[in-house]
Image (cartoon, rainbow, N blue to C red):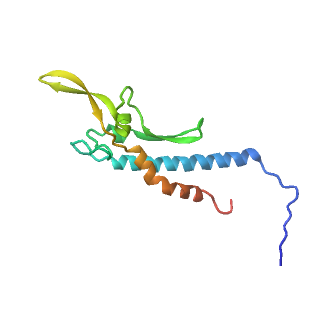
Amino acid sequence: GMITMRIKDMFFDRATVIRAVDGTKRKVLSKAGAFIRTAARTSIRKRKASAPAGKPPHSHEGSLRRLILFGYDRAADSVVVGPVGFKKSVAPNVLEYGGETVVLSRRGGRLTSRKVKVAPRPYMAPALEKERPKLPLLWRNSIRKGA
């Protein structure tokens, strides 16, 4: 009861296959980026006070949450997720990893600045860890039956 199958003269259009695989990969990576972005954004709650060290930062005016974006990086063949548009500000990085930054404040009509140490309040790494178990399912669900 053994079945033997032989395929003769089989060929495929390599460019078409590569394009299909690349398109699927781009879609899967983009979905992964969207999931991680959403997890990061929803972890940042709107509150007046600072978040406790070790927890995601609180949002005071909304720009950190709003500017967490994702995009497919063709050169690196990967998806990049994180805050963008903070030209000279190190705030997003300092919040994630901790470190020193300069804080500006008004005192008696005068603008003053002081250096402060900030404990880490990670929001991107926990978002990745939260979504990591779901990522293999994106690949599995990307394969079309009968294609």
Q: Tell me what residue is drawn at x 52 percent, y 54 percent.
A: 135
| Image location of residue 29, percent across then percent down | 55, 47
Q: Tell me what residue is drawn at x 73 percent, y 44 percent.
A: 15
Q: Quadrant of the C terminus?
A: bottom right
Count the labels in the image: 0
- Dividing the picture into quarters, in which one does residue 113 lie? top left
Q: Quadrant of the N terminus?
A: bottom right
| Image location of residue 142, percent across then percent down | 59, 56
Q: In the displayed image of the protein, which residue is found farthest to the top?
A: 110
| Image location of residue 138, percent across then percent down | 55, 56
- Dividing the picture into quarters, in which one does residue 120 lie? top left
| Image location of residue 99, percent across then percent down | 34, 33
Q: In the displayed image of the protein, which residue is found farthest to the right?
A: 8
From the viewer's perspective, tell me whether residue 66 is left or right of residue 138. Answer: left
Q: Tell me what residue is drawn at x 23 percent, y 45 percent.
A: 47
Nearest the viewer among 61 and 126 is 126
Q: Note whether 131 is above or below 146 in the view shown.
A: above
From the viewer's perspective, tell me whether residue 29 is left or right of residue 109. Answer: right
From the viewer's perspective, tell me whether residue 146 is left or right of residue 33. Answer: right
Q: Note whether 145 is above or below 63 in the view shown.
A: below
Nearest the viewer among 144 and 37 is 37
Q: Tell me what residue is drawn at x 64 percent, y 45 percent.
A: 22
Q: In the displayed image of the protein, which residue is found farthest to the left?
A: 108
